[in-house]
Image: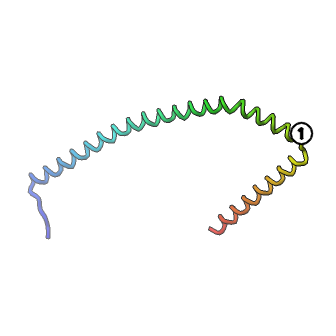
Amino acid sequence: MTITLNPKRKAEIEDGIEDVAKALREAADGLSKDAETAVAQAAEAVRKAADTLAAKAKPQARELATKAVQEVKDHPIASAAAALTAAAALISILAAARGKSKQA
């Protein structure tokens, strides 16, 4: 069954489609402006948080590094054993991950 439209109805439908397309374009334009603003604000907040974290972390990192150096000096054998254990654990984890990726 074929449906035919008279020229007037066809023009009304085409006008309606154009109106919808125009409204969608305007909504998208408004959304992108809002999204750009939101992204810019979020990026600024992340930058400020990173700066604050870096400012707080530097003294703490220095203190921890100093303590770690002192621990190694105080307990060289235990430190070497801990480092070797950590290396072995890391190698085991990497080998297991590589084995899983080959099976997939």
The residue lying furthest to the bottom in this view is 1
| Image colouring | rainbow
70 relative to 4 in the view: left or right: right
**What residue would you read off at disc 1?**
73
Residue at the image position 84 percent from the left and 53 percent from the top = 84
Splitting the image into 4 quarters, where does residue 10 fall? bottom left
Question: Residue 5 appears at what percent x and percent y?
Answer: 11, 59
Estimate how packed mark 1 is, as few (under 14), some (14 to 19) or many (20 or more) residues with alpha carbons within 10 Å.
Answer: few
Relative to 35, is 77 above or below?
Answer: below
Relative to 58, is 91 above or below?
Answer: below
Splitting the image into 4 quarters, where does residue 24 fall? top left
How many numbered marks have been drawn onto this rendered protein structure?
1
* The N terminus: image quadrant: bottom left
Residue at the image position 30 percent from the left and 41 percent from the top = 27
Question: Residue 22 appears at what percent x and percent y?
Answer: 25, 42
Relative to 66, is 14 above or below?
Answer: below
**In front: 4, or 34?**
34
84 relative to 103 in the view: left or right: right
Question: Residue 57 appears at what percent x and percent y?
Answer: 68, 33
Residue at the image position 76 percent from the left and 32 percent from the top = 62
**In front: 72, or 91?**
72
Splitting the image into 4 quarters, where does residue 90 fall? bottom right
* The C terminus: image quadrant: bottom right
Q: Secondary structure at mark 1?
A: helix
Q: Amino acid at mark 1?
A: Lys
